[in-house]
Image (cartoon, grey):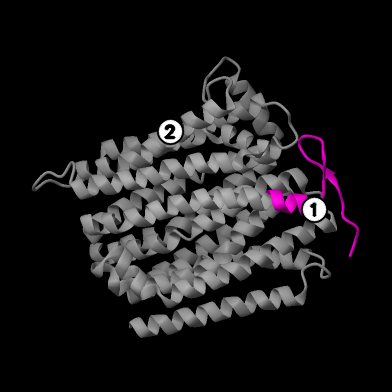
Amino acid sequence: MPPQEHTLDRDGGPRGPGDGFRSLARQASSVLGSHAAAALLGIASLPVLARALSPAEYGRLSLFLTLLGVVTYQDFLRPLLVRALAGAKNDDASLRALSTCVSWILAAFAIAAGSLIFPSLVAGFFALAVLAHGLASVDYARLALDGRAARAALVRNGAFGCSAVAAAGIAAAGMGVVPGGSGDLALAWIVAPFCAANVVILVVYRLHVGGAPTGAWSADTLRDARRAWTEHRPAILALLGFGLANALVISADRVVAGQFLDAREFGLYAGCADLASKLAIVGSALGTVLYPSYARNSDGSDAETRRFVTISSRVLMAWAAVLAVLVATSGSLVEFVLGADYAGGAWICAALFAAAFVHMLGFLVTPWQRARGEFAAQTKSYAIAGVAMVVVGTALVPVLGLVGAVACACTARVAEILLFVREARDLPRRILTARHVGSLGALTTALALLAVWRALEFA
């Protein structure tokens, strides 16, 4: 065993790998706790929404939340800010200016695109949520790098958990429903809490960080933004490409399914897919903690690489056990959470639960790559997966219906497979061994076979 390497923490004290791992575990536990609480609130709200709304109405709400996720993914500066500010003791004025400009541009795009899909009031909520999300990016980066990623996650998760509960309450109360009306006002009432959540997050982050108001303009804003663009252009272009590619990956199945399925089938698919997507909260929590940690400590040494492989191996083993239980109980879970109207889609959840195992690879690999300044590989991987999804979806959904939509969604996991292949090629064989790769393949195969068996039972 090689001798332990010691580094300095942010307060200047010595820190060994064991202490760093324990600190990381404490932060991860805090973030996972707040993510779990938000997930429970979301899961508790899901049956209320599914029962208060028809599958067709639920499909409209799901489309709004999906597109909100698509646009906020275009906030490509958030990961760049974490890495660029990792070695800085003070805020970088040029990066703050660039973040402000990008946020307003995204909000303008959101109001234009949202107006083509939603009623005007809903489109306005959509744009406001996007703007608030973007303006909070610099403050999030500072909190994460100051070791307060858990606190930032708690604020975010608390706000979104409360918004889910509020939306469920509004739906159950029937607010905004006009007999014989189109339901547009009801949709506006239900999505309003999700807009309010983003505004609350922005305000609370600002209070924690202090200083000048986020998003404030001055005579130097555009000049500083241009300077930041020039300095960080390679990483920005790579992250912009990643955001666009990832947007395609997270929305292609919904967009294609919405085109070829009737309203009820689309609502059935959306409800089951939303239930399965709650699992991504676990991976998001890990990425929230891992990225700032890697950004501070990644030095290309064997010790850091071994730490990455160790963390990934432990996480994936535990994750496989959780998913096996979820796949096995997917029938009861769907009927309990979503209600009898969605029971016919239990096989959809079984398939997407199994696919979530591969999805976790992305939450483990991308923080590692980004900490080393590697952004282009993620763009390429997700772009390939997004194009593959569109091809699979347009070919299969018109012919196979819901089966084609599930196949389209599972195709998204090509991205994580490509990312892992890249790491398997680059990591030293003495660290990423054949045993690691073989175990990953065996777990993936076992979960896939279990999902197929359950799907055939439901059929």
- Check if residue 19 falls in the magenta segment: yes
Instruction: Determine crowd level at label 2: few under 14, some 14-19, many 20+ residues with C-alpha closer than 10 A.
Output: some
Q: Residue at x 51, y 46 (%)?
A: 73
Instruction: Say left or right for 68 vs 46.
Output: right
Q: Quadrant of the N terminus?
A: bottom right
- Check if residue 8 falls in the magenta segment: yes
- 352 or 259, which is in the foreground? 352
Q: Which mark is residue 17?
A: 1
Marks 1 and 2 sit apart, C-alpha to C-alpha, by 37 Å
* Label 1 element class: helix
* Label 2 element class: helix
Determine the image quadrant of residue 346. Answer: bottom left
Q: Is residue 253 above or below residue 294?
A: below
- 325 or 69, which is in the foreground? 325
- 101 or 59, which is in the foreground? 59
Q: Is residue 204 visible?
A: yes
Determine the image quadrant of residue 71. Answer: top left
Q: Disc 2 marks which amino acid? A: Val
Q: In the rendered image, which residue does mark 2 sit on?
A: 200
Q: Which mark is residue 67?
A: none
Q: Is residue 368 above or below residue 416?
A: above
Q: Find residue 218 and report its horizontal and vertical position in percent.
A: 56, 16
Q: Disc 1 marks which amino acid? A: Pro
Q: Is residue 76 visible?
A: no
Q: Find residue 172 and report its horizontal and vertical position in percent.
A: 21, 50
Q: Residue at x 44, y 77 (%)?
A: 328
What residue span does the magenta drawing correspond to? 1-23
Instruction: Say left or right for 86 vs 331.
Output: right
